[in-house]
Image (spheres, rainbow, N blue to C red):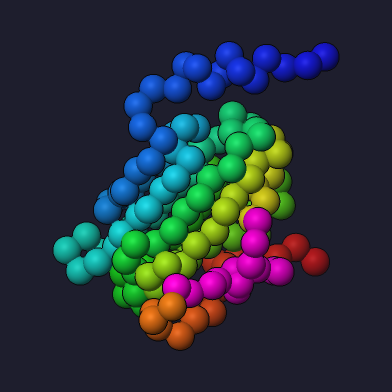
Amino acid sequence: MLEDRGSQHHQIPGDKFVNPIVDYQMRNWDYVVRPAADGPTGPITITLPSVAEAKGRFYSIVARNADAVNTITIADRDDSECWLGDIVFNGKCDRVLLYSDGLCWIAIGEMAGWPGLSTTRAPGTATPTTLAPTTSAPQ
């Protein structure tokens, strides 16, 4: 049976682009997230929407500002299978593209620290740093 996915998309309220500077709970329609963490706000956490409710959607998250002290943590809602641990950004332009298959979050591209992933820095930014997950991968 085919789902009527189109009916979900015409009911999207508000903007699909957000620039959080404090802890933020993503909504299903927050497809583009550009968080910034700095001295006045300190470290922040971006929590992904429910993996089941986000089924079939992509989410782009790119740090506008972050460093070793003012980190941006990307966390799930503890509802995802095979979550490898929180993703921590500690540099400007650290980024991840996440896809929900309804059961787990899949990181698309490359970002160091998550198995098979590494960050790509914009020209003229600092040397890439290793991003380590807060939990170890299942054996």
The residue closer to the viewer here, 35 or 76, is 35
Q: Which residues are magenta?
A: 108-122
Give percent across and percent down for residue 109.
65, 62
* As drawn, 81 above or below 130: above
Residue at 34% in and 69% down: 66
Say if the magenta span includes residue 73.
no
Looking at the picture, does residue 97 appear above or below residue 56? Answer: below
| Residue in the foreground of this view, choosing between 121 and 137 | 121
Q: Position of residue 111 (x, y in %)?
A: 60, 69
Residue 43 visible, this orientation? no
Residue 118 as seen in the image, left or right of residue 42: right
Instruction: Give coordinates of residue 132: x percent, y percent.
Output: 56, 73
Q: Residue at image x 46%, y 67%?
A: 94
Residue in the picture at 24% in, 66% down: 38
Q: Which residue ends up furthest to the left in the rendered image? A: 40
Left or right, residue 102 beside residue 10: right
Residue 63 visible to the viewer = yes
Q: Tell how many labels.
A: 0
Left or right: where 7 falls relative to 121: right
Residue 68 vs 139, above or below: the answer is below
